[in-house]
């Protein structure tokens, strides 16, 4: 029997070249290394099919520049075509740049799109497939993405789209192809919401991730998940379930013959495929010019982050700076921001490279009107980021497992507040004042934040239900860059307004 191998990436996030754009140093991940791994594998087996499970076109400066210029074939499509990608699924971040960019990525891609639970102008973007492998096995393929996207995305970016329930869509798609298949593999860009063994929830059950629930549906055999950037192979309700790490640092390898054998393979040991570099060379040059734009300088204070935990425990000046820009740009009384997972900050002289290495998401600026009651509920939810362990304040495991979520801890400027972490959750905010006066439930405030938080991202329901009074539709990187250019040298009004006690 001929040997067929399925290779699957997920959450590539624009990692094409093995390069850290913060300083152009070499890194040991990326599609350039994955390409070499696949070339070597093709010399050993009869058939290799490549799949990608979404979140491909967002996450690196190279892709930011590519997504802004529609005169070229989409760069990720070009690289996937070089890899001879067979099938793709969409992820939530693939919608971050609007319909025209997403449709260009799909159009320019030789791979078949599987995503069947997203309608564009009432027609599914993708379609389930049945592929007869070289060894004769009939493989059914179904692609699904989390339907939580409208909670995060700008409405105009998904204006002509409808997101269907992935569980209901899965049942429907299985019924359409089951009789034509020997094995069905589902690619779901979403994660696992419960413990593999106990079935207990590992997160708030918002339906952002429904992989565990999906395993209760009869009629399929393999579930490929994503979105959480985890690394595992397991079995849930008799289904083989796998997820690989992000940035093409790892891929799922499925040997498919008489048996199904699933492993995770690292790409770090493989050399860079130099044939990829000419494919992106022109765009790479444009990206480097864009990154090296000098924006201005910060006066008298470093915004570098040597240690992420302490930057959150003791509000870092970078937080003050971002909140300062959000407040002054929007005219809001208050401002909330988080430090993203791997934020490095920047020193006195700032380039666009420094900025995009620290503010990595294409968020926009929004102003909400919140009651004092909801503002305090927001602070209480943020306080859940910390816990006490061995008589020390540490990051709660809820924010590091199953997915790292430092970006869901907001710090608010414009008020003064104190958190006591040893108190029970929900009663940790022991003082919260505005202009020296304790905030009452019926007080009202305008507060600036990014659009992800404004729509309730991170389970901030109290923010989502508050009135939106301004949506700038302007990218935060653009706003920050403009502010630095106009106000250089920038004076950061840093205030230690948050006290965190054991």
Image (spheres, rainbow, N blue to C red):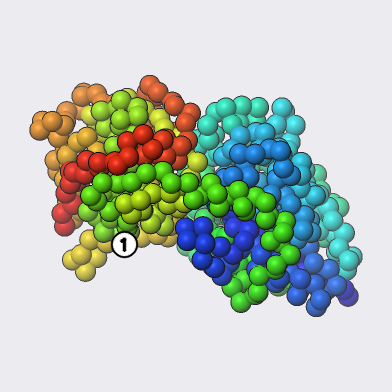
- Does the rendering let one see residue 211? no
Location of the N terminus (image quadrant)? bottom right
Question: On the picture, is 312 further left or further right than 478?
Answer: left
Residue 476: percent from left, percent from top: 43, 38
In the depicted structure, whether residue 311 falls above or below residue 436: below
In the depicted structure, whether residue 397 falls above or below residue 74: below
* Total numbered circles: 1
Residue 459: percent from left, percent from top: 40, 41
Location of the C terminus (image quadrant)? bottom left
What residue appears at the point 36 percent right and 34 percent down from the top-left corner?
Answer: 486
- Is 462 or 195 nearer to us in this picture? 462
Residue 55: percent from left, percent from top: 60, 50
What residue appears at the point 57 percent right and 27 percent down from the top-left corner?
Answer: 156
Q: Secondary structure at mark 1?
A: loop
Question: On the picture, is 480 further left or further right than 417?
Answer: right
In the depicted structure, whether residue 57 falls above or below residue 135: above
Q: Quadrant of residue 146?
A: top right
In the depicted structure, whether residue 199 falls above or below residue 499: below
What residue appears at the point 76 percent right and 74 percent down from the top-left corner?
Answer: 41
Residue corresponding to mark 1: 306
What residue appears at the point 88 percent right and 68 percent down from the top-left corner?
Answer: 135
Residue 109: percent from left, percent from top: 76, 47
- Does the rendering let one see residue 342? yes
- Is 458 or 100 nearer to us in this picture? 100
Q: Quadrant of residue 271?
A: bottom right
- Return the residue found at the far top: 469
Q: Quadrant of residue 252?
A: bottom right
- Return the residue found at the far left: 436
Quick one: label 1, few (<14), some, or many (20+) residues within 10 Å? Answer: few
């Amino acid at each position: 029997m001929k040997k067929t191998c399925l290779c699957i990436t997920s959450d590539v996030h624009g990692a094409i070249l093995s390069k850290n754009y913060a300083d152009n140093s070499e890194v040991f991940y990326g599609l350039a290394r994955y390409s070499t791994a696949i070339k070597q594998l093709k010399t050993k087996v009869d058939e290799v099919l490549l799949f990608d499970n979404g979140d491909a076109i967002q996450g690196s400066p190279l892709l930011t520049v590519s997504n802004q210029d529609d005169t070229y074939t989409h760069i990720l499509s070009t690289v996937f075509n070089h890899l001879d990608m067979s099938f793709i699924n969409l992820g939530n971040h693939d919608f971050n740049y609007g319909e025209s960019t997403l449709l260009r990525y799909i159009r320019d891609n030789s791979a078949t799109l599987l995503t069947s639970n997203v309608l564009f102008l009432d027609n599914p973007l993708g379609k389930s497939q049945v592929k007869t492998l070289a060894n004769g096995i009939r493989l059914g393929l179904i692609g699904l993405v989390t339907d939580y996207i409208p909670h995060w995305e700008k409405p105009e970016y998904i204006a002509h789209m409808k997101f269907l329930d992935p569980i209901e869509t899965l049942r429907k798609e299985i019924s359409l192809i089951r009789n034509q298949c020997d094995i069905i593999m589902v690619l779901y860009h979403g994660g696992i919401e419960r413990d593999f063994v106990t079935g207990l929830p590992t997160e708030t059950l918002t339906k952002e991730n429904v992989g565990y629930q999906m395993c209760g549906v009869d009629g399929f055999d393999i579930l490929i998940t994503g979105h959480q950037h985890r690394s595992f192979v397991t079995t849930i309700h008799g289904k083989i379930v796998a997820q690989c790490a992000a940035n093409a640092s790892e891929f799922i390898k499925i040997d498919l013959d008489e048996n199904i054998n699933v492993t995770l393979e690292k790409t770090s040991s493989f050399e860079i495929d130099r044939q990829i570099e000419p494919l992106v060379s022109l765009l790479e040059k444009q990206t480097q010019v864009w990154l090296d734009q000098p924006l201005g300088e910060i006066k008298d204070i470093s915004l570098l982050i040597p240690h992420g935990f302490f930057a959150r425990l003791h509000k870092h000046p970078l937080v003050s700076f971002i909140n300062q820009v959000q407040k002054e740009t929007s005219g809001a009384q208050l401002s909330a921001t988080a430090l993203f997972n791997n934020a490095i900050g920047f020193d006195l002289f700032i380039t666009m490279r420094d900025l995009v290495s620290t503010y990595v998401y294409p968020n926009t600026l929004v102003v909400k009107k919140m009651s004092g009651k909801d503002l305090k509920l927001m602070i209480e939810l943020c306080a859940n980021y910390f816990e006490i362990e061995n008589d020390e304040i540490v990051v709660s495991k809820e924010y590091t497992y199953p997915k790292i979520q430092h970006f869901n801890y907001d710090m608010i400027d414009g008020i003064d507040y104190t958190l006591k972490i040893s108190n029970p959750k929900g009663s940790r905010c022991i003082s919260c004042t505005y202009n020296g006066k304790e905030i009452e439930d019926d007080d009202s405030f305008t507060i600036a934040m990014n659009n992800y938080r404004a729509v309730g991202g991170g389970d901030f329901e109290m923010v989502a239900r508050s009135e939106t009074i301004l949506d700038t539709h302007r990218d935060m990187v653009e706003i920050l860059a403009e502010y630095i250019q106009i106000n250089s040298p920038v004076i950061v009004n840093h205030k230690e307004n948050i006290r965190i006690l054991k």
